DNA sequence: ATGGGATTGTGAAAATAATCACAAGGGAGA
DNA sequence: TCTCCCTTGTGATTATTTTCACAATCCCAT
């Protein structure tokens, strides 16, 4: 990390999305103040961990009272970079790609799927929610037109590397990759791996240890 | 952890699924021996970390040569508890539930979706791949009949807690939860949370720090 | 305006994890 | 069999993360 700003613990950053969500909840319920203990219960971490995490960003709370939900939410939005909306391109309009495109949880967090792309001409059409599936060849063009920044890879594993390279060439700055493959891309491209099999295999491991 | 076996570092356990997959790959390509360095490249971790992880289970490799793919795979299968097949019940036959049910990556790892469940009668039918969508009321009955152990929760967040309780009552031993909600279940139930929004928000955060 | 109860913010300590660096083998060819 | 080369296995070291514990201090009731 050679940026001018100080870096925060990775473990801390990975918890911020959880804080964001729970605070959004409180906000919807018109709760003005919450304690670290209250949040801790709901998220499943310790209260001291929450306070420590927040402390990296200064004194966000009110001693004796708790945290101001609206204020804290604004701070976290800024920290997570969510004051700015982001548009996504889903590449691979298959089962998973379609599910993600129709997932309301993304838009709730300022993330909007703006278009899908596929090589299969039978998919080229209006998708759910007025979304269009474009031929993959139009990726670069539509990226500019629609202002998309993040490429979501939901293509078969064998073509993931190739498609990733096309995304890089099309000047996407970040890739959210669901294919179970480690991508080789320039180091200035941000890649987030989402490997569902790891989760279920971890569960399977615990199951085996516990029950055999 | 009060079991009789020694516990391994959590971080180590979380990497075993990665090892499992890369070794399965080598196996398919009929590669007999691999070095830790070779695997490291492919997975994106350091070679010493791999060796350290394996060392908790004894000397699995051959000095000067590397690791025997087949042997190591067998060991890891045992460690992950994958010598035993597991059957899953997908609860919530919506967009995500259907995608998971049709996902070949699961079966490749000995995990089979045996049936789906939904409260919406319009979904009660033969799904893709000969899978049946049952009324939720038949959960306990079909669990026994089909020998399912893991409940996959792909229902809307608001009903996730209720459905989880039904799964517990139906004697599922583990829950793989995709709803963005922390579940309150007895401590003997294993819960694995799969929170996709965390991944994309983490990416969003990196994007904001890097480019603003 | 004062005191009591609550909760934050944070150094210090403890726990956990990653990295380093190299001795200890094992394999293969002469 | 001997030697050279390669890669493992692992103590020691360093880095990171979590937990602990309590002083600081803010709110509110009186
Ligand atoms: N289905 C799931 O639940 C699930 C879960 C985890 C991970 N994944 C991963 O996500 C990926 C997609 O899975 P899926 O189940 O949606 O598969 P799918 O077959 O339903 O969809 C893949 C889509 O990609 C398209 N495609 C193929 N080659 C392409 C290319 N070069 N460029 C653009 N599009 C192309 C296909 O036409 C198809 O529409 C796979 O890598 C899979 O391992 C899927
Ligand atoms: N779609 C995605 O890509 C995605 C990604 C991440 C997380 N999720 C989460 O997964 C869950 C499902 O998302 P989705 O997009 O598939 O929604 P969906 O609306 O397509 O599917 C939900 C299904 O659950 C069924 N259902 C409702 N109440 C039920 C009950 N009490 N018992 C059984 N079934 C019931 C509905 O009939 C529907 O078929 C949500 O919690 C969502 O937050 C979805």
Image: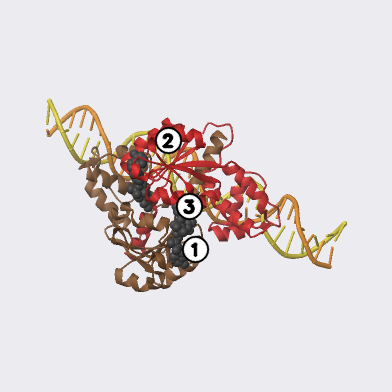
Chain colours: A red, B brown, C yellow, D orange
Front-most of residues A183 and B9? A183
Q: Earlier in the sequence, mark 3 or mark 2?
A: 3
**Circle 2 residue:** A139
Percent position (x, y) of residue B15?
37, 48
**Circle 3 residue:** A103
- The quarter of the image holding the C terminus of chain A is bottom left
- Indicate the secondary structure of the residue bearing disc 2: helix
| Residue B136, image quadrant | bottom left
- Indicate the secondary structure of the residue bearing disc 1: loop
Front-most of residues D27 and A149? A149
Badge 2: chain ID? A
Please tell me which residue is depicted at 41% across the width and 65% down the height of the picture: B122
Q: Is mark 3 within 8 Å of ligand 2?
A: yes
| Left or right position of A129 against C7 | left
**Circle 1 residue:** B183
Gap between marks 1 and 3 measured at Cα: 21 Å
| Left or right position of B51 against B155 | left
Q: Is residue B125 above or below residue B75?
A: below
Query: Mark 2 and mark 3 in contact (Cβ < 8 Å)?
Result: no
Q: Is residue B175 above or below residue B31?
A: below
Percent position (x, y) of residue D7?
27, 37
Gap between marks 3 and 2 measured at Cα: 22 Å
Please tell me which residue is depicted at 41% across the width and 34% down the height of the picture: A138
Front-most of residues A29 and B71? A29
Gap between marks 2 and 1 measured at Cα: 40 Å
């Amino acid at each position: 990390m050679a940026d001018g700003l100080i870096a925060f613990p990775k473990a801390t950053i990975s918890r911020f999305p959880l804080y964001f969500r729970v605070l959004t909840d409180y906000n919807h319920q018109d709760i003005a103040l919450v304690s670290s203990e209250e949040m801790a219960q709901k998220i499943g971490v310790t209260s001291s961990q929450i306070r420590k995490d927040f402390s990296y960003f200064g004194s966000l709370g009110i001693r004796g009272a708790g945290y101001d939900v609206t204020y804290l939410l604004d701070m976290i939005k800024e920290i997570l970079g969510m004051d700015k909306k982001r548009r996504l391109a889903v590449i691979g309009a298959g089962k998973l790609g379609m599910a993600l495109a129709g997932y309301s949880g993304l838009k709730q967090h300022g993330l909007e799927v703006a278009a899908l792309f596929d090589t299969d001409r039978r998919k080229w059409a209006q998708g759910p929610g007025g979304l269009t599936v474009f031929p993959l060849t139009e990726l670069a063009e539509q990226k500019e037109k629609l202002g998309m920044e993040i490429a979501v890879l939901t293509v078969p594993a064998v073509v993931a590397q190739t498609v990733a390279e096309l995304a890089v060439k099309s000047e996407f700055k970040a890739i959210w990759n669901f294919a179970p493959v480690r991508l080789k891309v320039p180091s200035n491209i941000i890649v987030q791996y989402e490997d569902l099999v790891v989760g279920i295999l971890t569960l399977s491991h615990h199951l085996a240890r516990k029950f055999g």
